[in-house]
Amino acid sequence: MIRLVVPRSLRYRDVALRTVAGACRIVRPRRATDPRPADLEFDDQVVTSVGEAFTNLVQHGDPGAATEDQVEIEIETQADRLTVRLLDHGKPFDPTTIAPPDLTRLPESGMGVHIMRSWMDDVSYLSGTPGAPGAAGTNVLSLTKRLGEFSRSDQGDRTTLSIAGTLDATTAPNIRRTIEAIVAERRASVVLELSRLNHVDSSGVGVIVSLYKRCNEYGGTVRVEGLKDQPLAIFKLLRLDRVFGLS
């Protein structure tokens, strides 16, 4: 567990975000070469979301009523996720109760919360009650981002999407932005390289099927390579081996 205590002031926002950025590098796999685009996206989304949370806490809290005019930041790193908790003792502000903004109306506020919800896998809040973690009267905002092992590479008309580890309900959402980009660009040939995929569940299969159907709609193709063990058994059980021509 990493802990940092800073004054509740935007002057210390950069100090907090530098610490969060360092924690991101602890969670994601170390690589001998430069980080993959997916790695940098993970870092950017976490740091941006925590930055929005910190700003909201400073702007919407009530320093005059605070018992301690400071913010405590807890960073918990696990093998497949990063959780950042912001604890303060000011006026409660629950971002999870804020309605999503109508982006078609070009709103001038409320976008920070929308960013947090869109880029983090879980956002939760406990107001200042004795039941909250820490001392009585502590507000706790928790942000969790799960790490998905995947990368995209393009060569001519061919796009290769490599997925490793686990593709399930917790990691599948992380790959959706990449799939949206592939479809939007109408890539002609997409190859799913799954030789390092160890486990897949129905949510993971759903993401792959969605990519296949959407590419077919504009005449693109999707091919699966390297599937084995549990993922291959799941594909056969669901008769997707026939769809993708797997043996």
Image (tube, rainbow, N blue to C red):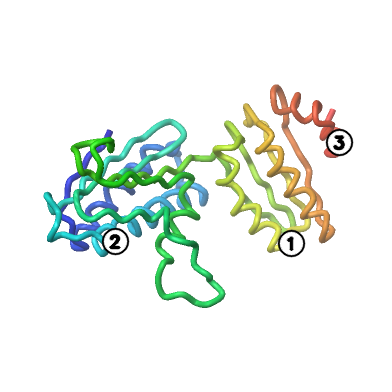
Query: Residue 131: x percent and y percent?
Result: 28, 35
Residue 101, placed above or below residue 3: below
Q: Nearer the viewer, mark 1 or mark 2?
A: 2
Label 2, residues with CA under 10 Å away: few <14, some 14-19, many ≥20: some
Residue 130, placed above or below residue 221: above
Q: Is residue 126 left or right of residue 166?
A: left
Label 1, residues with CA under 10 Å away: few <14, some 14-19, many ≥20: some
Residue designated by label 1: 186
Q: CA distance from mark 1 to mark 2?
A: 38 Å
Q: Quadrant of residue 186?
A: bottom right
Quadrant housing the N terminus: top left
Residue name at image x 22 percent, y 62 percent: 10
Kind of residue indicated by mark 2: Thr
Kind of residue indicated by mark 3: Gly
Q: Is residue 89 left or right of residue 205?
A: left
Q: Earlier in the sequence, mark 1 or mark 3?
A: 1
Residue designated by label 3: 245
Label 3, residues with CA under 10 Å away: few <14, some 14-19, many ≥20: few
Query: Residue 67: x percent and y percent?
Result: 12, 50
Mark 2 secondary-structure assignment: helix
Residue 158, placed above or below residue 186: above
The image's mark for residue 55 is 2
Quadrant housing the C terminus: top right
Residue name at image x 40 percent, y 45 percent: 124
Kind of residue indicated by mark 1: Arg
Query: Residue 47: x percent and y percent?
Result: 37, 53
Q: Earlier in the sequence, mark 1 or mark 2?
A: 2
Q: Earlier in the sequence, mark 2 or mark 3?
A: 2
Of the pair 19 and 127, the residue shown nearer to us:
127
Q: Quadrant of residue 233?
A: top right
Mark 1 secondary-structure assignment: loop
Q: CA distance from mark 2 to mark 3?
A: 51 Å
